[in-house]
Image (cartoon, helix red, strand yellow):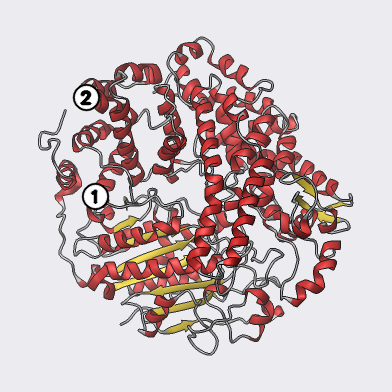
Amino acid sequence: MSFPLIRSRASRRDVLQMLALGAAASALPRFAVADADTDARFVLVILRGALDGLAAVPAYGDAGYAAQRGQLAIASLDHRLDGMFALNPAFDNLHARYQAKELLVLHAVASPYRERSHFDGQDLLENGTANPLGKRDGWLNRVLPALPYRTRRSEQVAVALAQNVPLVLRGDERVGSWAPSQLPAADSDTLDRLADLYSTDPVLSNRLQSALSANEMAGGGGMNGGSRDPLGQLDAIAAAAGRLLAPADGSRIAVIELNGWDTHANQGADNGQLFNRLQALDRGLETLRTSLGPAWSRTAIMVVTEFGRTVAVNGTRGTDHGTATCSLLLGGAVAGGRVVADWPGLSKPALYQGRDLQPTTDLRSVFKGVLTAHLHAKETDLNQRVFPESGSAKALGGLIRA
Amino acid sequence: MSDLDFIATNRFGLGARAGELGQAAGDPKGWLAQQVKGTRSSPAAISALPNSAAVFRVYEESRQQQQESKRAVAADPEEVKKKFMAVRKAVAPIYLDQVAARYETAVKSTESFRERLVHFWSNHFAVSADKPQVAALAATLENEAVRPHLASSFGDMLLAVESHPAMILYLDNQASIGSDSIAAKRFERRAAANGRKVGINENLAREILELHTLGVNGGYTQADVTAFARVLTGWSIGSDRGPMAAGEVGKFLFRENAHEPGAQTVLGKRYSEAGEEQARTVLRDLAKHPATATHIATKLARHFIADDPPPDAVTRLAKVFRDSSGQLTEVHQALIELDPAWRPEFIKYKTPHEFVVSTLRSVDLVPAKPQQVFASFQLLGQRPFTPGSPAGWPDTAAQWDGPDALLKRIEWASQFGERVGAKVKPLEVAAASLGQSLSDRTRTAISRAASAAQGVALLLASPEFMRR
C-alpha cells in the first residue's frame, strides 16, 4: 500500500496533513480556537548537574554569606533585588525582567529528595514523587489529561525541545519533540513509505507522526544546531520554542534541558565558568521572550535544578553536591518583582547537615501553584495522580497574575 | 521475531557483517563463548594512537602556552575564549583519531560481542570528553584500563580505571587534599592569605560508590562518601610544573603529602593502611561487595535482555559474579547461558552508537576521514565519549526513542542511502544483516523502493533494524 496523495516535491506540511488524515484521531479539528482556558504557555527549563543557588542568587545580606562562601562569594552586586538577595552579575536580562515585575525568584527550595546523587535527584524531580523509582513517567505528562485542552491532541499541547523526551514529559500521553538538525530533510516519498512500513508498529508510527508535526511547527530546516556546547544550542532551541508556543494553534507546554551545572572545580565567582553559563542562560531566556512575541504576556517559564550545592567552597575552588537551591519563575503572566523565600540563614547551625542550604519550600508546592493558577489544573488531580502522596506540599498561591 | 544467529550477531554482537550469520548459525553460543575467553593484543588501529601520558603532555603544553599569552592580552574575554579554543584545538585531532580508531575496530571486528563488552564497560566507567582536560583522555581510559582487563577480575579493572589519569582528572581527584595532610599544612598560610582553602573534593569517592560499585541504593551514607574521599586523597597525576612537579608527567602518582593521614572507616570497616594501599584495599573490598555484584548484574541484564531486566536473570548473574569473585570471563559466559537473552522478540531499541555501528558493519564501510566517522554520531545525538555525566549513556529505550530522534535517524539513513546506494544491493544487505529476521513487510518495501538509495534508507529505518 502506498499513499497516492504525495509525490516527491510535496512539503512536510503536506506529509503531515496526509498522515493526520490517515489517523483516527484526526477527526478532531487541527486548528482549535484559542480561548482563555487554553491560552496560557508554560515552559519548564531543567538545569542538569545541580545549579549553585547561592551563585545564581547570592544572599549577600546574610551575615554568613561572605564568610561561608569565601572566594566564591559574589562581589559585584549591581543586580540587587532587596536587602538580602541579588541576581548574579551575569543576569542582565533577568534583572530587567525583575524590574518589570515579570521575574519571581524562589530561594531555599528543594524537591523532596535528600540524598546527593544527580541521577536519582533528577529522576525524582521529574517523576513527581518522593522516590527516584516512585514512577516511571513524568508529572508534566500525567497532568496533561487534567488540563482543559478538550479539542487538542496531547502532542499538539506538549513538546520537548530535545531529540529525546526527558522523563518529566514521558508517559502515556503522546508528546512532540524537536531539536536543531544539521541534516537535510528526508525526502517526503521516503517518509510516506516509512509511515506505511510503521503502520504495524505503534511505537515508531506514533513517534514519526509526532516528529513531523513538531518539525513543521518549529520551522524545520535551516537551523544550525549541533554545537559542541549544549548551551551553545540554547539560542536556536529558545527561538524554536517561541515559534512552537506563539501561534494560536501552537504548543502550550515545552521542556528545555541544559547540562553542565556540576561545578566541582574552578567554579568562579564574578566571572569564570559558572558566570559564562549563567550568561548564556540569561540570553537564551531573553531569546525565548522575544520569540514568543505577544504570547509572552500569557507565559510562565520555570527554571529548576535537581538540588543545590554545598555552602562552603571545597578543596578545588568549587562546590560539592548539596540540598536546597534557587528557582526562577518568569514571564508576562508571573506576579514577579519579588523574592519568595522562607530564608533559613547561612550560619553553620542553620545549615542542612551542617553543610547545605536548608530547604524550606517544597518545589512541588511551586509546581502546583503554577499548574493550578496558570494552567487551570485542579488541585485534587495534582494531589492524587500528578504528585502522589504530596498532600503536605500545598499549592503556593500568588505566583501568577490574577 | 528473530533467529538465534540474528541474536548472536546483533543483540550480543554489534550487527552482522556479510557472512557472519552463517558463521554464528551452527553453534551461536559457542561462537560467542570463544570471543570472551582469554586476552587479545590491542587492535592495530588502537595501538597506533598516543597513550594517555602523551595526550596529557600535549594538553598541558598547549595550556601552558596559552596561559603565558593570556597574561599578555590582559583580561579581554574574547581573547581568553580564543585561547581556550586553541587548547581544545591542540587535542581535537587526537580525539578524532581515537574516534576513528574505535569505530574502525568496531566495524572490522570478527569478535563483535567482545567489542560490545569493551563499549559496555567503558560506558560503565564513563568519563566525558566534554571536560577539556579529558577531551582526548577519555578514549585512553577505554583502551588502557578497560580493553586489557576484559578477561580479568572486576576488581582488577576497577583498580585500573580509578587510577587512570582520565578518571582522576574527570572527577577532580588530583586536587583533593586531606585537611591534615602535609600539603595542607604547608599551603595553609598562603591559602588563607588569598582567601583560598585546601580540602577534599568528594566527586570521585561518590561516583565510585554510586555508579562504579555498590549502586545508589548500595547502603552507603554521606559519612562513607566523605571518609572514602579522604582515603582517596593523594591519588593524582605526575607533573613537571610548579609546586606540583613530581612523578612521571601524565601518569598515576600517589602524592603522599596530599594524603589525609590516619585510619578511616568506610561501610563500617576501619582501614588503617598507610598511603596508597588504603584506597586500594577499600576498592578491593568494594569490588567484592554483594551490592556491587547486584548492581553490575542489573546493568548487564539491562543491556543484553531488557530495559526492565527479569529479576531471575539478575539474581543468576549476581551469583556468578560473587561465586567467581568477579571473574569477568565467567560473568560474560553466564550472560550467554541466560535463556531470556535469547528471547526472539526485538527487545532492545538501538542507541545511536549501535545504530550507526551496525549500519557500517552491514556494508563494511569505514569512512575515510576521522571527521566523517565522528559526524554521524554527533548528528544523531551520541558524540563519542561525551555522555555528559559520570553515569554514562543511558541504556533504556525511553532515553533514545524520542520522535525527533527517529526523524534524525531517518534523515541520516536517507543520506547514507544516497552515499552507498550506487554500490550495494539493498535486499542483499538486508539478507546478510538480518537473515530470517527480515520481515516480509520490510522486504516488500525495499523491493519496491524507487532507488537503491531509498531501499537502503528503508532498510536502516525499518522496525527490525532499529532494534536488536
Pinpoint the chain carrying mark 2. B
Q: Which residue is rendered at x = 44% and y = 13% of the image?
A: B19
Instruction: Indicate the quadrant containing the N terminus of chain A: top left, top right, bottom left or bottom right.
Output: top left
Check disc 1: other Cα within 10 Å, few if <14, some if 14-19, many if 20+.
many
**In the rendered image of this protein, does residue A49 appear above or below residue B29?**
below
Instruction: Indicate the quadrant containing the C terminus of chain A: top left, top right, bottom left or bottom right.
Output: bottom left
Looking at the picture, how far across and down is residue B398, in whole percent?
Answer: 43, 45
Pinpoint the chain carrying mark 1. A
- The amino acid type, in three-letter code, at marker 2 is Ser
The residue mark sitting in front, 1 or 2, is 2
**In the rendered image of this protein, does residue B66 appear above or below residue A82?**
above
Quadrant of res B63: bottom right
Looking at the picture, how far across and down is residue B409, in whole percent?
Answer: 34, 38
Looking at the picture, how far across and down is residue A390, in whole percent?
Answer: 49, 67
Judging by the rendered image, the residue that carries numbered circle 2 is: B451
Judging by the rendered image, the residue that carries numbered circle 1 is: A213
Q: Which residue is rendered at x = 40% and y = 82% of the image?
A: A98
Looking at the picture, how far across and down is residue B394, in whole percent?
Answer: 51, 44
> Is any atom of residue B406 visible in this view?
yes
Q: In the figure, is residue B176 to the left or right of A318?
A: right
